[in-house]
Amino acid sequence: MTQGKTTDVFTPEQRSAVMRKVPGKNSSAEMAVRRLLTGMGLRYRLHRKDLPGNPDVVMAGRRLALFVHGCFWHGHDCRRGARAPKANAEYWTAKIARNRARDTASSAALQHMGWRPVTIWECELKDSAKLEARLRALLNVSAD
């Protein structure tokens, strides 16, 4: 490894082990959204493999598919999502672009099937009252 070429403090093997631990489902962000929905008295299904993009939370009766996305991994336009990695930047830029293209295709396919795809971003979890209001508006549920 040449000096100044990378900012990574891990060896490639260690970095690979760290990346394997990033959850694909049941992330803390997803669990927070599920707790909000359950607290609102709503029922849902998880990770429907028969729907495009395997939505994180599905409300079939309402034809609503929720995706809970990490800002970095899916290229959100917030501060965290706009952060460009310094190490292996070309790889990460391409990977995030592929993730965004896949997300767009999944949403289009769901809309074509008559579903309402909704993305909830990780940064939205900072204000749970605002997120709950957004979910109530989406679901036409009043606060009791």
Image (cartoon, helix red, strand yellow):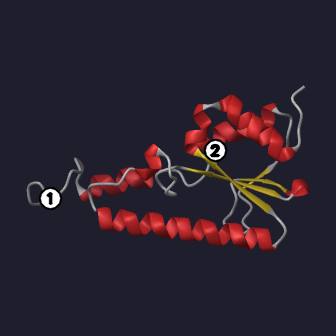
Q: In x, y percent, where is residue 79?
A: 44, 44
In which quadrant of the rendered view does residue 11 lie?
bottom left
Residue drawn at x 85%, y 68% as measured from the top left:
114
Question: What numbered label is drawn on residue 32?
Answer: none
- Tell me if 32 is positioned left or right of 58 in this view: left
Q: Secondary structure at mark 1?
A: loop
> Image quadrant for the N terminus?
bottom left
**Upstream in the sequence, badge 1 or badge 2?**
1
- Tell me if 9 is positioned left or right of 84 in this view: left
User: According to the image, label 1 marks what residue?
Assistant: 5
Comparing 59 with 109, the one in front is: 109
Residue drawn at x 65%, y 37% as measured from the top left:
32
Q: Is residue 101 visible?
A: yes
Q: In x, y percent, where is residue 38?
A: 79, 36
Residue kind at label 1, given as amino acid type? Lys
> Image quadrant for the C terminus?
top right
Residue kind at label 2, given as amino acid type? Glu
Residue drawn at x 19%, y 56% as measured from the top left:
6
